[in-house]
Image: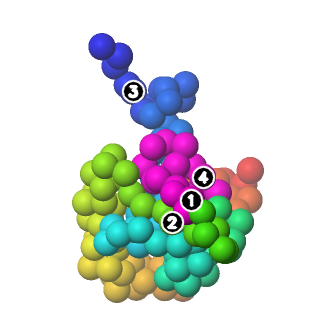
Amino acid sequence: MIEWNPYDRNCPTRKLLDRIGDRWTVLVVGSLADGPLRFSELAARIDGVSQKMLTQTLRGLEQDGLVRRTVTAAVPVRVDYELTEAGHTLRDPLKGLEDWAKAHMAPILEARERFEAAGAPSSTTSPEGASS
């Protein structure tokens, strides 16, 4: 049996974690949790996603076997996206992240304000305060 180690930069789990940790993936999986949607329905539901990013996200999820793309011959052609069985198993962990973000947003916004008010270090300053 293969032992996967996401802390190893060469392990394929690293790429998968990049994909499922992406904000658009979280929103696409959440949107498809209740059933299939067309591209335009997904785009309308996910405010701010560009057509390019939605296309890339859907292709990546399809590549990983998390989303199924179904083309129906009609005029015009109908294309639906839905979660696969594996995609449905991802919904609960991602929903947990959504719930966590909503529950902790107020203190996080307060922390950001305090950080900015304290004079956030510039991007040319290392975390220890020394210039790079």
Residue located 57% across and 49% down the image: 60
Residue located 49% across and 63% down the image: 81
Residue 5: mark: 3
Point out residue 75 in the picture as x, y percentages from the top left corner: 66, 74
Point out residue 15 in the picture as x, y percentages from the top left corner: 53, 39
Neighbor class of circle 3 (other Cα within 10 Å; few <14, some 14-19, many 20+) is few
Q: Nearer the viewer, mark 4 or mark 2?
A: 2
Instruction: Give the secondary structure at mark 2.
Output: strand
**Do residues under tags 4 and 2 come within 8 Å of each other at their CB atoms?**
no
Is residue 62 visible in the rendered structure shown here? yes
What is the three-letter code of the residue carrying label 4? Arg
Instruction: Give the secondary structure at mark 3.
Output: loop
Frontmost residue, 65 versus 50: 65
Q: Earlier in the sequence, mark 3 or mark 4?
A: 3
- Residue extent of the magenta highlight: 56-72
Q: Specify the quadrant of the image occupied by residue 56.
A: bottom right
